[in-house]
Image (tube, helix red, strand yellow):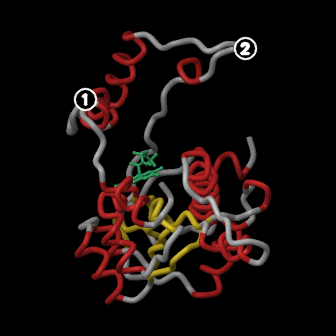
């Protein structure tokens, strides 16, 4: 349809990278494109910790062994950030209320929109990457290594670099399953089974079924690491 839409539809997460580094000026351009994303009331309630040194990548990898952290050119940690808000509030008053679900949504959505823009900008320049949400399983440890202060928390990381291996584009749910006209339409078991089959064919029967992986996520109570860290950072 056009170059932008073609690029978006060609997106594939990449977890294996060559040794090629993203030049500093290019990386800055990519991140500034990320900052251009829409943001709640222009508050920009996120910060980015840019990790490029081998030592710091190793320290993060030691906490959560995702190979993309070690192999990438740059690992960006998208952090929800109300620390900046505290400083602004304190210019006028002591009372500050960063805690709660709505505030968490504001900062997490802002971080996610910027992160998606960053990945897309990188892809537009021939680089690749993957978002790494599993860092939240080790929220406290990541916060410590990165020096995240009160009122901040890791949302996800983005590993960026030059791809050494690229998978086929992963098929998404059919349009009709995701989009309802005018009023919400619940999906059926048949919708889920049909997509299980699509995913199974895509992955050459190598992984558990899509629906089985959903059970792994939501068939048990959630891991407490994120909540505990949010309490630690005075956000809950
Ligand atoms: C917020 C978020 C967190 C993610 N975390 C991880 C992760 O920790 N490890 C990983 O290998 N992939 C991670 N991914 C990548 C997804 O697995 C991937 O986007 C999805 O399987 C669809 O595949 P595609 O991006 O290649 O189309 C994450 C994606 C998102 C949006």
Question: In the rendered image of this protein, does residue 94 appear above or below residue 114?
Answer: below
Residue visible at 74% across and 40% down in the picture:
1
The image quarter containing residue 32 is bottom right
Q: Secondary structure at mark 1?
A: helix
Residue 18: where, in percent of width, then height?
Answer: 37, 76
Left or right for 165, reference 103: left
Left or right for 14, reference 177: left
Left or right for 82, reference 234: right
Residue visible at 20% across and 39% down in the picture:
206
Residue 162: where, in percent of width, then height?
Answer: 46, 72
Q: How many marks?
A: 2
Left or right for 49, reference 45: left
Q: Residues within 10 Å of mark 2 (few under 14, many from 20)?
A: few
User: Which residue matches tag 1?
Assistant: 212
- CA–CA distance between discs 2 and 1? 31 Å
Any mark on residue 182, and which? 2
Q: Secondary structure at mark 2?
A: loop
Question: In the rendered image of this protein, does residue 234 appear above or below residue 142?
Answer: above
Which badge, 2 or 1, is on the more N-terminal residue? 2
Residue visible at 43% across and 59% down in the picture:
230
Residue visible at 58% across and 18% down in the picture:
176
Q: Residues within 10 Å of mark 1 (few under 14, many from 20)?
A: few
State whether label 1 is within 8 Å of ligand 1: no
């Amino acid at each position: 349809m056009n170059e932008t839409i073609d690029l978006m539809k060609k997106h594939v997460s990449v977890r294996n990278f060559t040794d090629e580094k993203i030049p500093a000026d290019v990386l800055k351009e990519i991140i500034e494109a990320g900052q251009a994303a829409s943001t709640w009331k222009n508050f920009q309630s996120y910060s980015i910790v840019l990790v490029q040194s081998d030592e710091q990548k190793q320290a993060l990898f030691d906490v959560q062994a995702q190979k993309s952290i070690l192999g990438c050119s740059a690992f960006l940690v998208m952090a929800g950030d109300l620390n900046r808000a505290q400083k602004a509030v304190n210019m006028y008053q002591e009372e500050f209320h960063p805690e709660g679900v709505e505030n968490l949504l504001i900062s997490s959505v802002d971080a996610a929109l910027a992160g998606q823009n960053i990945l897309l900008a990188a892809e537009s320049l021939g680089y690749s990457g993957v978002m790494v949400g599993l860092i939240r399983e080790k929220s406290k440890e990541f916060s410590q290594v990165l020096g995240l202060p009160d009122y901040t928390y890791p949302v996800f990381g983005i590993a960026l670099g030059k791809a050494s291996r690229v998978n086929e584009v992963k098929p998404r749910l059919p349009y009709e399953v995701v989009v309802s006209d005018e009023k919400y339409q619940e999906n059926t078991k048949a919708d889920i089974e049909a997509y299980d089959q699509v995913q199974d064919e895509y992955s050459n029967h190598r992984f558990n079924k899509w629906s089985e992986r959903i059970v792994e996520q939501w068939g048990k109570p959630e891991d407490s690491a994120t909540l505990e860290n949010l309490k630690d950072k005075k956000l809950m």
